[in-house]
Image (cartoon, coloured by chain):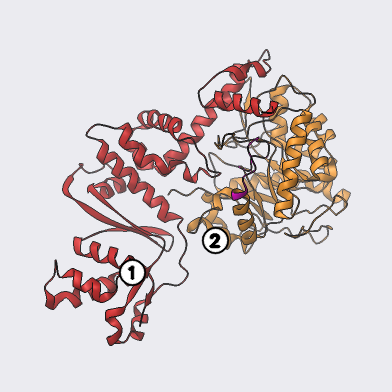
Amino acid sequence: MKCTDLVGAFFYPVDTIDFIYPSCTGQMTQSSTKPFLGFGLGLRAEHYQDILEHRPENVDWFEIISENYMVDGGKPLYYLDAIRQDYPMVMHGVSMSLGSTDELDFDYLEQLEALMERVQPRWFSDHLCWTGVDHKNMHDLLPLPYTEEAIVHIADRISRVQDFIGQQMLIENLSSYITYREDAMPEWEFLAAIAARADCYLLLDINNIYVSSFNHRYDPIDYLDGVPAARVWQHHLAGHTNDGNLIIDTHDQDIIDPVWALYLEAAKRFGPVSTMIERDGNIPELGQVLAELEQARRIAEPWYQSRS
Amino acid sequence: MTHLRELQLRFQDYLTGGSEAIEADIVSTEKALAEHRLGAYYNAYRIRLIDALAVDYAALEKLLGREAFEDMALDYLQRYPSRQPSLRWFGQHLPAYLAEYYRDKDAEFVCELANYEWVQTTVFDASDSVELFQLEDMARVEAETWPLLTFDFKAALLWLDMHWNVPQIEAALDNGQEPPQRQRGDIAQRWLLWRHAYKIHWRSLDVHEAWALEQAASGANFAEICEGLLEWVDAQQIALVAAGFLKQWIGDQLLVRIGNY
């Protein structure tokens, strides 16, 4: 049917790990204990019924794509509400266009705020990108040049969004296919500078680091070492497509071993970070995605336990 | 204009098929030239938007075939680039646009099919109606109040008029079956679409039920509807026919509320 789809989340029985959930209205500072939701999935319409029928216990939380639920009613919101009853959720947006030089879209932010009221997410996030100018939306996550001008521009807009919503947000790194000639610093410095200036948190996509490191020929370990560990609150893991010269972030394949290896390095560095699988194309049965999630758990948990 | 804005305008101009000036801003490497790298964005933009359109207009895509659908969708994308945060709204102008794109004898049929699909999308995620008026609620309606009864319908309900046998063709295409022969009626048929239990339902309406429903939805009371039905129905049968419509609407879960009793 013509549904745009969704995403979701669930509770991790992490009684032994000290974590604090951010309230929807409160402010958290970097000194707060990092919240840890456990291991989650991006909620997709293909899995709605399976989730409701079987309530999988090995999913701790779901992430939803915010824009898919900015509708008046019907099946998307029905499943959202039903699944939310059993699982914690976080909200992930694709159209805030934080890096755009258009004005911030406050109509969009009002819709986001209304959805947050409904979902009561643990947090909300969007991307370190722009999606269009001149009031057009390319529906793609377009990279910014890594310049001081861009840092000031996007950090100011993140601050304004955080002021409007009333809580801090998470910013996700992209997979990118281009390097601007004017880039003045590596991506991790750009990301770290923005996070510090806007006082926001990071959604570090491990696959995106791998993809961009391949496309731009840098060491992904440098990236992990270059971001502020305390600000890393969430990880995405996903698959991609490699044409030999360029990797495209398609989210339609299983996660490859080098990405798992990079995730292990992240677990060593960042401690317990809420981790989830993103699958957006060629979506398999829920069981197959859960198997990948178990792999993430097997890789990271030993390091989390040793740190706690 | 800031430097960053100029860069973004150049990039977007490239994506939408304008100038290639942005290539000068991008680093080429031995393995991937700037042109190849930018091409990933150029292609992704088109594929993503065409695919979104194909989700909302699945039957139209099957009818036209992928290649013809893509040609049409690319032209539509040029005319109506997305201006909304969600892809949900990208296809909203397509039914009207198709009348310009297909100026031949197929235009009317294609437009009706597209409109029918868009109405389904609209009904699919229209507002929920928490409580519906049920047949047992009629027990509370006293006989003398009937003439003044008014009717509030759920939001997830729309109707449209079509000359062609679009619903039968769409249903066949949706089920992967060979669609029936196209047939055009001289008089447009009104079709009612509504959502119940998160599923889309549809049925055709006779001309007098179509009139009665439209009047009821516009605020006419029961007596006014009965009076208007005299055009099609004998006076002795009016109340029975109108009450029959009401019973059908309640049974179809279309009514949120009945007023004035």
Subunit of label 2 = A
- For disc 1, the marked residue is B219
Q: Going 29% across and 74% down the picture, which residue do you hit?
A: B221
Q: Is residue A127 left or right of residue B183?
A: right
Q: Is residue A207 left or right of residue B86?
A: right
Q: Going 84% across and 52% down the picture, which residue do you hit?
A: A29
Q: Is residue B192 magenta?
A: no
> Which chain can be seen in red?
B
- In the picture, residue A216 is in which quadrant? top right
Distance Cα–Cα, label 2 vs label 1: 42 Å
- For disc 2, the marked residue is A53
Q: Main secondary structure of the magenta part?
A: loop
Q: Which residues are magenta?
A: A95-107
Tell me residue B41's x, y (percent).
Answer: 58, 27
Badge 2 amino acid: Glu
In this structure image, what is the colour of chain A?
Answer: orange
Q: Nearer the viewer, residue B256 or A276?
A: B256
Would you say residue A242 is visible in this rendering? no
- In the picture, residue A202 is in which quadrant? top right
